[in-house]
Amino acid sequence: MLPFDVYPLWDIEPVRGEGCYLYDKNGVRYLDFYGGHAVISVGHTHPRYVQRVTEQLNRLAFYSNAVQNSLQRQLAERLGEASGYPHFSLFLCNSGAEANENAIKLASFDTGKKKVLAFGKAFHGRTSGAVAATDNPKIVAPFNLTPNVEFAPLNDVEAVEAKLQTGEFCAVIIEGIQGVGGIIMPDDAFLRQLRARCSEHGVRLILDEIQSGYGRTGKFFAHQWAGIEPDIITTAKGMANGFPIGGVLISPEFKPVHSMLGTTFGGNHLACAAALAALEIFEEERILSNVAATGALLESELRSVAGVKELRGRGLMVGMEMEKPTGELRKKLLFEHKIFTGAAGTHVIRLLPPLCAGKPQVDELMEALRKAVK
Ligand SMILES: Cc1ncc(COP(=O)(O)O)c(C=O)c1O
């Protein structure tokens, strides 16, 4: 049997990682400005992370959600404090898409309604409901097409109002910053209006912070730049620095009912230990301040790069829209300069480095970029 061939692969095999760097089987070093798709938060093989996960693995890796698991309580408490949501509660699952499925389900249970409003260029994952709320017909199978999801243009509050007035919607789902769509920001004012309109119409506001959250923009969640409080926040990617986990942060307005949500693997001991290790490192190494400082430096440096049409994003979630298609440039960065970057569409380079990246990594990227764009 072979792997099902759904990924276009670079012909490179990283076999080891350390901080912001990856090493292939020949010992060649690569600078990671992609973070394995915004996943690496505290750095590859951080010693404290490795130690915490190893200790947990030696103690107990998994038991079911039918018994007490104090690691889940510790994680909920620590995440509540770190994120500014100590009054919310936490449901743990295994991925971003699964977090969004559960968020939509909760909003639907809560309101008794079935329609979800999403936005143009949105990406919310590949499972049934999440992909239905994703604005990309190429990845939506006929089975996933549903009249229960409608789309509005981003930053168009009147379009949202027209939809919500129908009274059919249980939720609006929006990314803190659109990632896959090309690092496209909802305006802060739009987010505030969205919050107000959802409250007026009794519709639940779901903030998908799977890519934009967990410190990536310099605040814990990207929506916190707008000063709003959603009803539900979804998270995954950076949460456990690469160990699969997803989380749904739920406002105290929702009342849990036994069995309304559930999962076999979600919140397992190993995942909780990995997520706790990440949060401990966030605090000890002041990851949020590091993201703000490194992000500001990166932005000011990128402004002087030739061929950049527009720079978007916040902190270490940067979209560099180029005047020309980016395929050749990314290949040069990877094969000549040994730097991983991400893409969105044909013209946008996405920079999503580990959140521990600093000036040495920015300098290395800039030196390579200046040569590569010539
Ligand atoms: C904003 C957003 N939501 C959801 C997802 C889906 O997450 P996962 O691949 O863990 O299911 C992603 C993944 O890229 C994402 O960027």
Image (cartoon, rainbow, N blue to C red):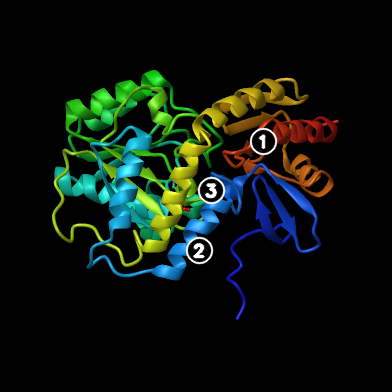
- Looking at the image, tell me whether mark 3 or mark 2 is earlier in sequence order: 3
The residue at label 2 has a CB less than 8 Å from ligand 1: no
- Looking at the image, tell me whether mark 1 or mark 3 is earlier in sequence order: 3
Crowding near the residue tagged with mark 2, few <14, some 14–19, many ≥20 C-alpha atoms within 10 Å = some
Q: Is residue 8 above or below residue 351?
A: below
Residue at (30% x, 63% y) in the render: 263
In the displayed structure image, the side of residue 135 where residue 39 appears, left or right: right
Extreme residue toward the top, this view: 189
Measure the alpha-carbon separation of dots 2 and 1: 41 Å
Label 1 belongs to which residue? Answer: 347
Spot occupied by residue 311 in the image (x, y as percentages of width and height): 62, 25
Crowding near the residue tagged with mark 3, few <14, some 14–19, many ≥20 C-alpha atoms within 10 Å = many
Q: Quadrant of the N terminus?
A: bottom right
Mark closer to the observer (3, 2)? 2
Q: Amino acid at mark 3?
A: Val
Secondary structure found at label 3: loop
The dot on residue 39 is 3
In the displayed structure image, the side of residue 278 where residue 305 appears, left or right: right
Residue at (28% x, 51% y) in the render: 73
Crowding near the residue tagged with mark 1, few <14, some 14–19, many ≥20 C-alpha atoms within 10 Å = some
Q: Amino acid at mark 1?
A: His
Decide which of 34, 146 is in the foreground and name it: 34
Spot occupied by residue 112 in the image (x, y as percentages of width and height): 14, 46
Label 2 belongs to which residue? Answer: 54
Secondary structure found at label 1: loop
Secondary structure found at label 2: helix
Q: Amino acid at mark 2?
A: Thr
Q: Is residue 229 above or below residue 70?
A: above
Res 165 seen here? yes
Q: Quadrant of the C terminus?
A: top right
Mark closer to the observer (2, 1)? 2
